[in-house]
Amino acid sequence: MSTHTLSPKSSNESLQSTSSTFSFPDKLSPAVTGPMVWKGDELNPAKYVVELSKDEIRDVRAAVIKVKIAGTPRSEINQETFDLGNPELAHKLSLISKEIHQGRGVAVLRGLDAANFNDEEAVIAFAGVCSYICLERATDSYANQTLSHVRDATKDVVPRWAKDIGLAGSKITAAMDFHSDRFSGDILALHVRNDGGKDAGGEQFIVSFWTIYNELLEKDPEVLETMAEANWPFELKQKDRAPYLELGPTLFFSNGKPICQLVKAPLLGTPLIHRDPTMPVVTKKQMHAMHAVEELAKRFCTKLDRQQGDIQFVNNLSIMHARGAYRGNNGKPSTRHLLRMFLRDPANAWGKPVRFRNNFDDPFAVGRPQNLPVLDSDPWRLISGRESHG
């Protein structure tokens, strides 16, 4: 049986934040407790769905109209420019940040479908509402995207220049295993514009990584040791250049909080985005760790309650997510369509490990252009991004 100390090859800096409370920072964190530790149906919709009243929906619509009349660029939507005119609603939204950082790690804001927004208005509302929950929006340095569209692009006409570029996971209809979007942002926000229709698939699943962590700590701590080693071979794609190798862990700690950043695509490749043959392959221990986490995720997960118009908020550091395959009808592409952003709230954000702090901070670099496209016109390059998942 392995002890709970890490491999000598693991970097103390890679695992711990500067404010760690441990006497021996190279040890795994003790079992975690609190509301973010839950299993399956223990997380029922009554605990995480926040309903908007008719008056609150009207306040959001009025804020959208103000933005349109003022001609405010979408990249400049914030609490000042998206004026709700309702301090109580603003406070209600701010409480969602505490829930996703200190509570269960999941929240769903429900009711915006009743506003009947068009495509432009939906993007404005999504950005504006999110600004009251998390002040900062992430930007993908590869594509300068802040908002991306999760949709079926498998039947789009492929330009000649893009024939060798595979669609990202956010643009295909295949099922996706449990993962956290690596170095993309603290909070994953998804606005359900179209759920794809009844029996069309695309179900969303979430699981507490903290529950998985506790189970592995007791039953198979060597998996956690493997995840914490800074030798996972991530392949990072680059625009018009060869990909490069980035080594790092998939498990970090901040003040005793386990942080999971495990995603398989840049480690294994996908059917549409092949791994470059020059890249090293994952080790047997790493394969075992991925399998162990996936099996426990399936065991402890729950299906996310979803309705059209929902805005979903998931803590990308502690909650893993997955989706089922989905499909269109009669040979047509699926109508399933989600808007996605990654967010950070400085008031509630977790500390990050020193060695990889730049990686966590990079999406929020000041001065980088933000792209919030109303329509997804380029699923191969500008919109897909480097590590874009659905």
Image (cartoon, helix red, strand yellow):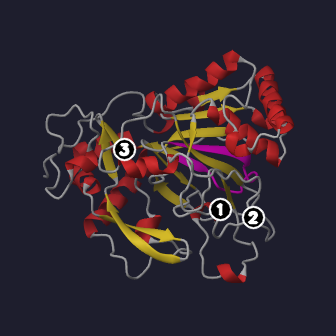
Report x, y in % for residue 291: 36, 60
Tell me where the magenta segment starts and ends, as one range: 187-205
Name the residue rendered at 63%, 21% in the picture: 92
| Residue located beneath label 3 in the image | 259
Of circles 3 and 1, which is in front? 1
Q: Nearer the viewer, residue 74 or 178?
A: 74
In screen coordinates, is 166 left or right of 128? left
Is residue 233 one of those drawn in magenta? no
**Disc 2 target residue:** 377
Q: Secondary structure at mark 2?
A: loop
Q: Are marks 1 and 2 in contact (CB under 8 Å)?
A: yes
Which amino acid type is shown beneath numbered disc 2?
Answer: Ser
Which residue does the numbered mark 1 point to in the structure image?
Answer: 383
Q: Nearer the viewer, residue 293 or 95?
A: 95
Against 208, is 21 above or below? above
Determine which quarter of the picture holds residue 199: bottom right
Who comes first in sequence, dot 3 or dot 1? Answer: 3
**Residues under labels 1 and 2: Cα distance?**
8 Å
Q: Position of residue 129 (x, y in %)?
A: 68, 33
Q: Relative to 195, is 360 on the left or the right?
A: left
Identify the residue at image location x=13%, y=48%. 3
Tell me what residue is drawn at x 69 percent, y 26 percent: 51
* Dot 1 amino acid type: Ile
What is the C-alpha distance between the residues marked 2 and 3? Answer: 34 Å
Label placed on residue 277: none
**Helix, strand, or loop for circle 3?**
strand
**Which element is circle 1 on?**
loop
